[in-house]
Amino acid sequence: MELKDFIPIVQLCEHYSVEVSFFNELHEEGLISITTLEQTSYLHQDKISDVEKMIRIHRELNINTEGIDAVFNLLQKIDSLQNELNKLHNRLRLYENDY
């Protein structure tokens, strides 16, 4: 675990104009994982795109963190189903080319 892969929560709050409590609520809901080192809270850089989606859901749809959890889980399920559909479509294309 290298510190360069993590971004301080305070810096994210300033950049996205959200309160620290928003990140704490996302963490309590299990949507993000916050790492604390030397009394500073950090978020891994790989989760930034997820957090940006959550912030948009919160702002544009005025949805609380419990609702964000539900919406985000549905979006992940849609992505999973879309990937499965693409795999099946590709397999079907292989059989169609054989005939």
Image (cartoon, rainbow, N blue to C red):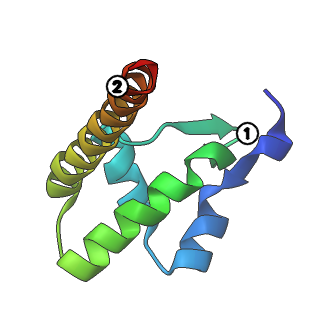
What x and y, as percent, mark residue 98?
A: 44, 18
Of residues 15 and 47, the one nearer the viewer is: 47
Of residues 95 and 9, the one nearer the viewer is: 95
Task: Determine the secondary structure under disc 2.
Answer: helix
Q: Quadrant of residue 36?
A: top right
Q: Quadrant of the N terminus?
A: top right
* Label 1: how many Cα within 10 Å (few below 14, some 14–19, many 20+): few
Residue 1's place in the image compared with 66, above or below, is above
Q: Seen in the image, is 98 located left or right of residue 38?
A: left
* Label 2: how many Cα within 10 Å (few below 14, some 14–19, many 20+): few
Q: Quadrant of residue 92?
A: top left
Residue 1's place in the image compared with 60, above or below, is above
What x and y, as percent, mark residue 29?
A: 27, 41
Residue ID at (70%, 54%): 7
Q: Given this view, does label 2 or label 1 mark the residue nearer the observer?
A: 2
Of residues 43 and 94, the one nearer the viewer is: 94
What x and y, as percent, mark residue 26?
A: 35, 49
Question: How far, Cα to Cα, is label 2 from label 1?
Answer: 54 Å
| Residue wearing tag 1 | 38
Residue ID at (73%, 39%): 38
Callout 1, which amino acid? Glu
Residue ID at (53%, 77%): 16
The reply to whether residue 44 is visible in this rendering is no
Task: Determine the secondary structure under disc 1.
Answer: loop
Residue ID at (28%, 68%): 57
What x and y, as percent, mark residue 46?
A: 63, 44
| Residue wearing tag 2 | 92
